[in-house]
Image (cartoon, grey):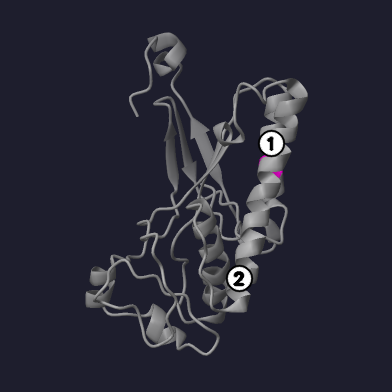
Amino acid sequence: DCEVQYIAGANNLIPTEIALKIANKIYSNERFSAYIVVPMWPEGNPTGTLTQRFFIGRLGSVYYLFHKPLVVCHPLWRENWKFAKMTMQIMYEIIYKAMKEVGLDGTYEPQDYLNFFCLGNREAEDTTCTSSGPFSTSNPQEVLISPEKYNYAAAWISNQDQARNNRRFMVYVHSKGMIVDDEYVIIGSANINQRSMEGTRDTEIAMAAYQPQHTLANMLSAPRG
């Protein structure tokens, strides 16, 4: 489980380490890919200061993933979007450098080794910025990015009817298990996040297992996952 709570505009070395791991595998001529899921909604109280900071950084990475213009009213949101974009660009630059040095730049793309995903609906291309109220229920495609003096509680904490009309629901990415190619299973709490990296807070553990008689090499079949 790679819980990327800080990958959007991160101030730690986790994104760099992921990119360097991929680069090392490229130099070793080993196939290795990383898939990073950026949640739409972080854990915690939505009106809390820490959660609001996650919102700001994560908003930037989500829009960068969708490769679309970002309409921003709040200068702080615009600045964090820039750092989210820079984080991803740095990772891809490390990977491309390794690909070019071993002569794979004409065969593969950096996206063959690193991909970012978001579990959310893509909004309409025609987006507008508003400061007159919470998400409109008349237009499910409307995108709202709050100005500095906007009421965050009113904007982000809506009732179920508003959430349903706007098609926005909480999806918290926090998987504790993964099956790879119908062959390997990884189970545990080995998150990659700020708390785990500090060394004095969360204790993480994980295990990986496989059955030799059920490997792809022995079964001579393609994955069914």
Separation of residues labelled 2 and 1 (CA atoms): 26 Å
Relative to 119, residue 217 above or below: above
Q: Quadrant of residue 151?
A: bottom left
Foreground mark, 2 or 1, reads 2
- Give left or right: position of 77 versus 127: right
Q: Position of residue 147 (x, y in %)?
A: 52, 83
Q: Position of residue 14 (x, y in %)?
A: 68, 51
Whether the residues at callouts 2 and 1 have beta carbons within 8 Å, the answer is no
Look at mark 2 in the image and give the residue it sits on: 78
Tell me the residue at 42%/81% (across/down).
Answer: 130
Q: In the image, which residues are magenta?
A: 17-21
Q: Position of residue 160 (x, y in %)?
A: 24, 75
Relative to 95, residue 63 above or below: below
Specify the quadrant that holds the C terminus: top left
Residue 95: mark in rendering: 1
Instruction: State which tag comes first along the sequence, 2 or 1.
Output: 2
Residue 132: mark in rendering: none
Residue 216 shown in magenta: no
Majority secondary structure of magenta residues:
helix
Tell me the residue at 77%/25% (across/down).
Answer: 101
